[in-house]
Image (cartoon, coloured by chain):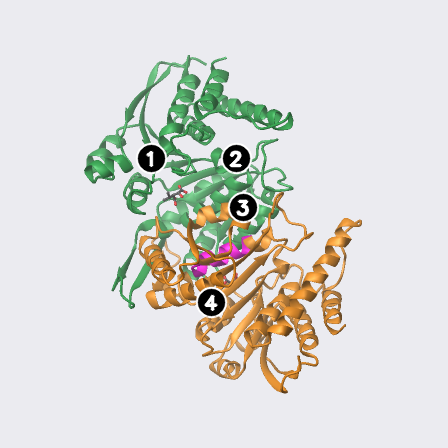
Chain colours: A green, B orange
Amino acid sequence: MTQAPHTIRLAVIPGDGIGKEVVPEGLKVLDAALAGTGASIERTDFDLGAERWHATGDTLTDEDLAAIKEHDAILLGAVGDPSVPSGVLERGLLLRLRFELDHYVNLRPAKHYPGVPTPLTEPGDIDFVVVREGTEGLYCGNGGAVRVGTPHEIATEVSVNTAYGVERVVRYAFEQANARRQRLTLVHKHNVLVHAGHLWRRTVEAVGAEYPGVSVDYCHVDAATIYMVTDPARFDVIVTDNLFGDILTDEAGAITGGIGLAASGNINPDRAFPSMFEPVHGSAPDIAGQGIADPTATILAVALLLEHIGEPDAAARVSAAVDADMATRARANQEGGPLTRSTSEIGDAIAQALRA
Amino acid sequence: MTQAPHTIRLAVIPGDGIGKEVVPEGLKVLDAALAGTGASIERTDFDLGAERWHATGDTLTDEDLAAIKEHDAILLGAVGDPSVPSGVLERGLLLRLRFELDHYVNLRPAKHYPGVPTPLTEPGDIDFVVVREGTEGLYCGNGGAVRVGTPHEIATEVSVNTAYGVERVVRYAFEQANARRQRLTLVHKHNVLVHAGHLWRRTVEAVGAEYPGVSVDYCHVDAATIYMVTDPARFDVIVTDNLFGDILTDEAGAITGGIGLAASGNINPDRAFPSMFEPVHGSAPDIAGQGIADPTATILAVALLLEHIGEPDAAARVSAAVDADMATRARANQEGGPLTRSTSEIGDAIAQALRA
Ligand SMILES: CC(C)[C@H](C(=O)O)[C@@H](O)C(=O)O
Ligand SMILES: CC(C)[C@H](C(=O)O)[C@@H](O)C(=O)O
């Protein structure tokens, strides 16, 4: 398994709240996974998030962005803090990164590990991925307001969808489906959002013609939230827009046993820019600073990162180590009660398993 | 309980699919509930939906609309059929009614009846209402597309939100909360949809100042889909925009034991136009024509209708009859298996209980 020695330039953005606690565990596991492979990490830490904003007023400067672009990949913890007005860090930092680095695929696997408690009575075999579009839709920041604060205020938000943008993410989703169980579900709301919805539908039809082996299904977003609860095993690959993907992946996190296990990749498949890997959860100010956040989502994000940068063996070993850790948890649940481990104890356990 | 004899002018729109099967059961129950009260129903049936569109090309003519306006209330089954292009009936009929009749409150109660199977292991005490805005947001039909069908297509959908529109629905929600458990949760996504989100947030703050007894909470829509599954009992009144309300109420239907039990009122609280009551479920073409649809959602919509038109006693009796029917189902579930009753058998049972 030893390869020629090479260096992976990694930009690290711990961000806010529990982001700062889970990222070190991800890095611990990353080092353990790469030990002996010939690959080593050259890390740059970026001080971005609430503290930086309070100190300097910056969210993400052009210089930060230029420096980040010089890396092979990005590991991000979480962004957002109650001390910063809502939207400032989300739009100015997290979404700016996704848009400027053209992360048009937001890949979010959802998998239920055997034995992990789920809120569903009959979860079935949950194992799907959501391919969420990452650079269009209502996330464009294309909106505005007039007469703000008066009784005549009007505020608009514009969902922008392009054939170019939809086609590339739909194609990626078909590739995923082809490599999985050959089922693709488009989620939209084309009975109301007729313009955007029909663009998505036509695109799925057109691209689908190139993938005759993949069966295609359609679901309105409202119905999709029902299936998530009543029959999530029906899904293999879901392709959807930015907002619907945001909503469905949180629900998917909940049904698979908690958002502490859900990882995501903000991917530029063309490799024009570095891709960014992060847990789906946020900065969770309510539990930050206590060392109790589950770093598993970040560790699974590291597996996605390894896959993306061409280290599939290391990625598979991280996944296997997480599988094993999940089995340990399941055993503990059966034998009298859940394990209570700190953030770093979970990271240590998984890193240790990798080095063993 | 006998009042002065009076007539309630009811516009009836069975619509498509199972709409045609559940509406007669709703009417059966309505008659039973009003028997002996002095109130009687003067019914006008409106032939609207897929068949009418195929025959004439009309969705809802100005004449239909003028005639409907001459009524005290509307009972609607469901709208939509696979034989009609997506959006034609939804926008041209259902949404046109909601918009033209200024149904700015879309009231959707969610309640888990004891003993009714739910997909959740620990449903807790689910009893909340969603106050969904009904005349703004992404449902305005304010969107368009250029270069359709070319690689340069751009499709937009615009969410329009006004202080006027948000304030009136938020006020209604506070009134609801005040009459319930004094908890109001605003659901939005103000960290991304900063313009619309902040309008909603400021409005909830401003109106909330008039309701010091109501505690106010906020939840991003993605997080709300999680709580729906992990802790739905936390909700009392949810106020949200048109699209988020659409999504959350389907999920709410799923967790309370199925969309076959979820009713809704499209309400114009100012009584400038007749309000419209309907099940949350759609026309369900997959089960239409078999007489197996559950009419309970429509019957609960009839209870909302009775409440709205000033027959609270009759409304309470319908609710109680549904409660009793739910208890019968729960007993059957415990004693060896679910009841298998046809659509009309359920309607008969509830109507009979009311006449007893
Ligand atoms: C923090 C927020 C802007 C973000 C999003 O809405 O995309 C988050 O919810 C996510 O899903 O990554
Ligand atoms: C049929 C559709 C237009 C409608 C909506 O989106 O409002 C339905 O889903 C509902 O919730 O009443």
Of tags 2 and 4, the one toward the viewer is 4
Identity, as a three-letter code, of the amino acid under mark 2: Ala
Please name the predominant secondary structure of the magenta segment in the image.
helix
Identity, as a three-letter code, of the amino acid under mark 3: Asp
Chain for numbered disc 1: A
Labels 2 and 3 in the same subunit: no
Query: If the image is split into quadrants, where does the N terminus of chain B sit?
Result: bottom right
Q: Is mark 1 within 8 Å of ligand 1?
A: no
Q: Which residue is mark 2?
A: A179
**Distance Cα–Cα, label 3 vs label 4:** 25 Å
Chain for numbered disc 2: A
Identity, as a three-letter code, of the amino acid under mark 1: Asp
**Distance Cα–Cα, label 3 vs label 1:** 26 Å
Of tags 3 and 4, the one toward the viewer is 3
**Distance Cα–Cα, label 2 vs label 3:** 36 Å
B242 is within the stretch colored magenta: yes
Mark linked to residue B266: none
**Distance Cα–Cα, label 1 vs label 4:** 38 Å
Query: Element under label 3?
Result: loop
Magenta range is B240-251
Badge 3: residue crowd in 10 Å (few <14, some 14–19, many ≥20)? some
- Residue A198 drawn above or below residue B224: below
Labels 3 and 1 in the same subunit: no
Q: Position of residue B276 (x, y in %)?
A: 53, 72
Of tags 1 and 2, the one toward the viewer is 1
Labels 3 and 4 in the same subunit: yes
User: Considering only order in the chain, which callout, 2 or 1, is on the residue closer to the N terminus?
Assistant: 1
At a point 55% along the width and 54% down the height, the residue shown is B252
Q: Position of residue A27 (x, y in %)?
A: 38, 23
Whether residue B284 is visible, yes or no, is yes
Q: Which residue is mark 1?
A: A16
